Amino acid sequence: MFEALSDRFDGIFTRLRSRGRLSERDIDEVAREIRIALLEADVNVAVVKSFIARVKERAQGAEVAKSLSPAQQVIKIVHEELVTTLGGATGKLTMSPKPPTVVMLAGLQGSGKTTAAGKLARLLHSDGGRVLLVGADLQRPAAVEQLRVLGERVGVPVYSEGRDPVKVVKGALREADRLDATVVIVDTAGRLQIDADLMDELRRVGKAAQPHDSLLVVDAMTGQEAVSVAEAFDDAVGLDGVILTKIDGDARGGAALSVKEVVGKPILFAGTGEKLEDFEPFHPDRMASRILGMGDVLTLIEKAEEAFDREEVEEAEAKLRKGELTLEDFLQQMRQVRKMGPLQSLVGMLPGMPKELRDAEVDEGELGKVEAIICSMTPDERRQPSLINGSRRLRIARGSGTTTQDVNALLKQFKMVQQMMRQVARGKRPQLPLPGR
Ligand SMILES: Nc1nc2c(ncn2[C@@H]2O[C@H](COP(=O)(O)OP(=O)(O)O)[C@@H](O)[C@H]2O)c(=O)[nH]1
Ligand SMILES: [Mg+2]
């Protein structure tokens, strides 16, 4: 996500780092480059203008922090202003003091409403909420069925009936009372374009639902178009916030960087993929760090906490400290890391990752191979790889559908990791074969 924009900033800051003191002209030049980068990213013109003005003013005012180089100061200012443009503080759903809290999702067809309803239900359900999903999209015959499938996977009930969305909502609110639900999420019908009929239906559904949170679901990949759509919906039905979907496919970031300032409504959540778990609260500060290639360590940690079994981690840590890592532990850790999601998206969250690495295709097939090889070993072999002689090697290669070269490569790699771990265990800094920039 936001790769194109990240690359531009990367280039700008790399050039900046080679300078000493920044003259007024230097600052003008950087400002010009950032302006072009943002316009290319499809950020709204007025937003770009005010962003550049703020950065320039602060950079010239030189809030001189002695610990930072001139380049670092500019990066810090740009980071802070990006956070502001993305919405400042992390937004939250307005929860009704008297349950249930009603969340209504609106948006154009294909923007990701139904998917977002399922994802939001999953998030709130896992936080202990008693969620009721409501299928009020009766335009598309398959829409309610799609929602039912999602509800089943998340483990929350789905309510729908008949042909009138207003009746559905009224029935759903009674059902919510009966179920003692704390959150009701209403999925509504979309159209290909904004039209009077759609807005009229939304108003009627809204009147019946009296939502505490009226959220617009927009596709990030549509850039400026997403911003116009948000303005139109806000004018017609009034919005409390935005869910920005498909940011996984959005290289530019124009919608993310324009919505808050143009429409005045915060982005509350972001869709980061097609799966139910590909959904996160929108944190402006973390997004800004991601855009500037500073990584998003906090999200990474949260994902890790979700995927990792604490006891297993503690056990692995203890072994690490004693320098006793085995291939079995290696396999287990690999599986846990893979539970966190596609490696490519994880690498993108690491700070200071060289651009080449961020862009490199992580070979998931290669990982599958490693897993197959370790699985083909006997438990003894996993604990004591030195047992693996020529004939065992051949057996393992055959069993895993790989070659003896593959097995050798893995054993060599593992030995390196083991050595590194021993260094760590002895309190030394490991000598990582890191690629230089
Ligand atoms: N890559 C990606 N695809 C998404 C995301 N959210 C939704 N989709 C896909 O977008 C398509 C339309 O989604 P849907 O929820 O049916 O849209 P609706 O018409 O607004 O209800 C589906 O194929 C979804 O899988 C997202 O965050 N990332
Ligand atoms: Mg739908």
Image: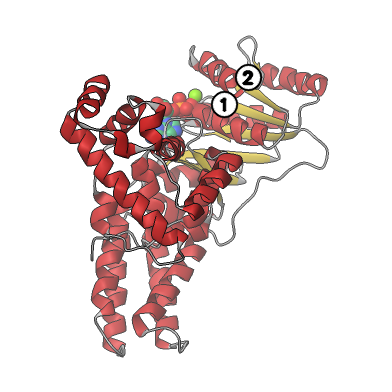
The front one of 200 and 168 is 168
Picture residue at 22% right of the left edge, 21% below the top? 398
Q: Amino acid at mark 1?
A: Thr
- Mark 2 vs 1, N-terminal side: 2
Determine the residue located farthest toward the top in the rendered image: 162
x, y percentage for residue 154? 59, 24
Residue 234 seen in the figure: no
Residue 341 drawn at (x, y percent): 42, 37
Question: What SS does tag 1 mark?
Answer: strand
Is any part of residue 313 visible from this angle?
yes
On residue 273, the disc is none
Image vertical order of residue 40 relative to residue 127, above or below: below
Judging by the rendered image, the residue that carries numbered circle 1 is: 188
Residue at label 2? 165
Given residues 223 and 377, the one toward you in this image is 377
Residue under the point 27% across and 40% down:
411
Q: Is residue 357 above or below residue 304?
A: below
- Residue ID at (83%, 38%): 98
User: Is the C-beta separation of discs 2 and 1 under 8 Å?
Assistant: yes
Q: Is 138 positioned to the left or the right of 355 in the image?
A: right
| Mark 2 residue element | helix
Q: Is residue 255 left or right of residue 7?
A: right
* Quarter holding residue 388: top left
| Quadrant the C terminus occupies | bottom left
User: How busy is the neighbourhood of tag 1: few (under 14 within 10 Å), some, or many (20 plus)?
Assistant: many
Q: Amino acid at mark 2?
A: Pro
